[in-house]
Image (tube, helix red, strand yellow):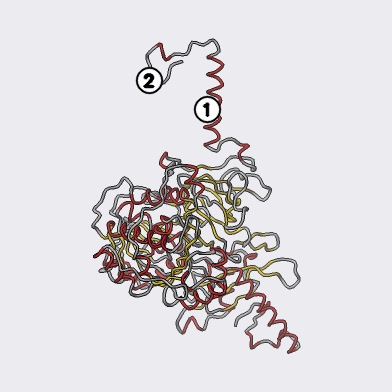
């Protein structure tokens, strides 16, 4: 036996036991490779095979996140703006300025006692400063967590309980709530930092002079952002080790909270790097991105933080989505790539036809965050240039983006795409076995380098073999995956399973319906569940005249009889959604409970349900208010 590439007899093995040693060595090597590839059936508690995406060697990157981003292999002009305020493009940061700002913030955070493992909560809206805070917190050895600056006090209280932050960075609008809720938890005012309207001026001064004058601190007074810029520069925490990369938390993202209170998903340096490697691929156009998705959410942050600094791809930032402003930004800045949630797609689809004239530079639009039907995607596609593609992708806070139809790939508009590199998935039936064959639904399980470390304070995120249960029911057809619905959201009607997303897609086709959500309610005799629709009327005189009976018949004409909205139709002002567009169905359930209680009390008070015409009851108990 010779070592590879050897020709010398001196390198050959002549020991009489060499064949046995070799056999054992090869068996051991094969076993190691088998385990690493996840092909050993006993590595999973679930019998049966799964699907695996391509796993390029690039996924074996074990540097810290900042080294991966700032010291990457891609060379570009460091003086070219990469983070640009879309409302005021004179406010921008190039790569050199961004590096200086991050290193300065690292020094400021360390000076204010942020140590390894400490969480820093960024309670802000979108801005070009946000990515710098993200990297600085992680670079200081801390754990980044973002939150919605519009959160109500009770929501903020839960976020602080999850995060247990050493420091909170917030805006002037949110400052009173933050000070009040944090004080109730025993935090000092000096653990709150105000990023106010003067922050861009402080950064401009830093970039000109290299350092701001030191401003003394006081425990009795909240910090100002300028105080984080007064301590010079500091290197980020760096390493290049698999064990450290996989075990060091970089960020904690709040889960969607669609079924109750959000959880904190802890992601390691290696997981975030792996997320990026899964979604990065070469495209035949110059990438210029526009983003209005919230940066505190993983879906938004995947495209806002790493791509600009690693590749020099410009990012234009909007604080929120507003159609006219969004389209104007696409047109003026010649945007080629953007990412949306389904609610944005529906707004585009309802817009006047000339809107397409301003989107000619777009080449790719990625859509995720909530379910969307194929016809809606096709309608949006017609607004784009013939060379452009709008496709779905699928991911979760806990796992990153797992499926996508990439630019240049052919795919069904109703599909969430193909399995991306670095992941393996399984569809598991109700019997606990892996689903075999195509077009057969099962609960989606995911495993891979991008899966979360754990939920904060919990150890039930993954099973012993690294599989994460998504709760989504899916099926595969010709390599493309399709989402049916959520296991906990499926409505069981007389033995049939009904996916709320299917009914919602039908309702949204009605020109007088702005938004809709469907949930299950128990029938009066308790024998089954029935679908109930919550409907937001579109603006306009004709929409105001929309009745529950019209909605019922509109859906009934397009759906099987067991999918009829026999649980009722309720008109509401808005559908409760998360920042990423997911429906908060637990709030719909609360609305159901309150409504049923009031209806029951009024029925008793008036003596009979037939006397409740003022409430808008229609035949068979369908409710309109």
**Which mark, residue 337?**
none
Q: Which residue is rendered at x = 32% and y = 64% of the image?
A: 316
Relative to 284, 4 lies left or right:
right
Spot occupied by residue 600 in the image (x, y as percentages of width and height): 72, 81
Element type where label 1 sits in the image: helix
Residue under numbered circle 2: 5
Element type where label 2 sits in the image: loop
Query: Front-most of 110 and 11?
Result: 110
Spot occupied by residue 579 in the image (x, y as percentages of width and height): 48, 68
Spot occupied by residue 302 in the image (x, y as percentages of width and height): 42, 56
Spot occupied by residue 9 in the image (x, y as percentages of width and height): 40, 11
In the depicted structure, whether residue 411 falls above or below residue 347 = above
Q: Is residue 384 visible?
A: no
**Which mark, residue 29?**
1
Instruction: Tell me the distance, in whole angstroms, between the alpha carbons under discs 1 and 2.
Output: 19 Å
Quadrant in which the C terminus is drawn: bottom right
In the depicted structure, whether residue 475 falls above or below residue 355 = above
Q: Which residue is rendered at x = 38% and y = 13% of the image?
A: 8
Q: Which residue is rendered at x = 38% and y = 62% of the image?
A: 108
Query: Front-most of 223 and 269?
Result: 223
Relative to 329, 54 lies left or right:
right
**Which callout, 1 or 2, points at the residue further toward the start of the chain?**
2
């Amino acid at each position: 036996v010779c070592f590879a590439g050897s020709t010398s007899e001196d390198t050959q093995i002549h020991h009489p036991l060499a064949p046995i040693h070799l056999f054992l060595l090869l068996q051991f090597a094969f076993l190691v490779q088998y385990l690493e590839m996840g092909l050993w059936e006993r590595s999973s508690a679930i019998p049966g095979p799964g699907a695996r995406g391509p796993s390029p060697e690039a996924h074996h990157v074990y540097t810290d996140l900042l080294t991966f981003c700032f010291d990457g292999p891609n060379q570009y002009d460091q003086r070219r703006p990469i983070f640009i305020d879309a409302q005021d493009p004179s406010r921008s940061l190039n790569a050199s300025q961004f590096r200086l700002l991050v290193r300065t913030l690292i020094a400021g955070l360390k000076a204010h006692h942020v140590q390894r493992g400490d969480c820093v909560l960024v309670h802000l809206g979108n801005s070009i400063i946000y990515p710098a805070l993200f990297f600085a917190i992680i670079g200081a050895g801390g754990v980044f967590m973002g939150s919605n600056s519009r959160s109500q006090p009770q929501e903020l209280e839960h976020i602080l309980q999850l995060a247990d932050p050493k420091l909170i960075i917030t805006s002037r609008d949110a400052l009173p709530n933050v000070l009040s809720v944090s004080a109730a938890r025993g935090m000092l005012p000096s653990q709150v930092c105000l990023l106010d309207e003067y922050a861009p001026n402080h950064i401009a001064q830093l970039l000109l002079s290299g350092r701001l004058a030191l401003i003394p601190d006081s425990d009795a007074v909240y910090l100002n952002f300028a105080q984080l810029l007064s301590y010079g520069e500091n290197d980020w925490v760096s390493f290049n080790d698999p064990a450290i990369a996989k075990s060091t938390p970089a960020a904690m993202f709040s889960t969607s909270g669609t079924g109750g209170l959000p959880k904190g998903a802890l992601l390691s340096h290696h997981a975030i790097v792996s997320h990026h490697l899964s979604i990065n691929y070469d495209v035949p156009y110059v990438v210029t991105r526009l983003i209005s998705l919230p940066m505190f959410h993983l879906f938004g942050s995947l495209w806002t933080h790493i791509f600009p600094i690693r590749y020099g791809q410009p990012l234009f930032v909007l604080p929120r989505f507003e159609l006219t402003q969004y389209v104007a930004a696409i047109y003026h800045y010649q945007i080629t790539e953007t990412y949306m949630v389904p609610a944005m797609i529906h707004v585009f689809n309802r817009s006047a036809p000339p809107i397409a004239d301003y989107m000619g530079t777009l080449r790719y639009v990625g859509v995720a965050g909530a379910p969307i039907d194929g016809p809606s995607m096709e309608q949006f596609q017609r607004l784009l240039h013939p060379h452009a593609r709008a496709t779905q992708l699928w991911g979760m806070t806990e796992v990153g983006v797992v499926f996508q139809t990439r630019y240049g790939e052919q795919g069904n508009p109703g599909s969430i795409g193909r399995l991306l590199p670095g992941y393996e998935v399984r569809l598991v039936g109700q019997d606990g076995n892996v689903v075999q064959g195509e077009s057969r639904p099962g609960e989606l399980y995911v495993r891979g380098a991008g899966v979360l470390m754990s939920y904060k304070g919990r150890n039930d995120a993954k099973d012993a073999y690294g599989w994460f249960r998504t709760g989504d029911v899916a099926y595969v057809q010709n390599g493309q995956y399709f989402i049916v619905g959520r296991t906990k959201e499926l409505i069981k009607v007389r033995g049939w399973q009904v996916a709320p997303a299917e009914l919602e897609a039908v309702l949204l086709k009605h020109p007088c319906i702005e938004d809709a959500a469907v949930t299950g309610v128990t029938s009066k005799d308790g024998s089954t569940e029935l679908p109930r629709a919550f409907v937001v009327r579109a603006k306009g005189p004709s929409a105001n005249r929309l009745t529950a009976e019209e909605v019922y018949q509109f859906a009934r004409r397009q759906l099987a009889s067991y999918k009829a909205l026999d649980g009722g139709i309720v008109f509401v002002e808005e559908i409760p959604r998360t920042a990423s567009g997911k429906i908060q169905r637990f709030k719909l359930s609360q609305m159901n409970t309150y409504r049923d209680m009031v209806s029951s009390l009024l029925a008793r008070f008036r003596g009979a349900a037939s006397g409740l015409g003022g409430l808008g009851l229609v035949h068979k108990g369908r409710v309109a208010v």
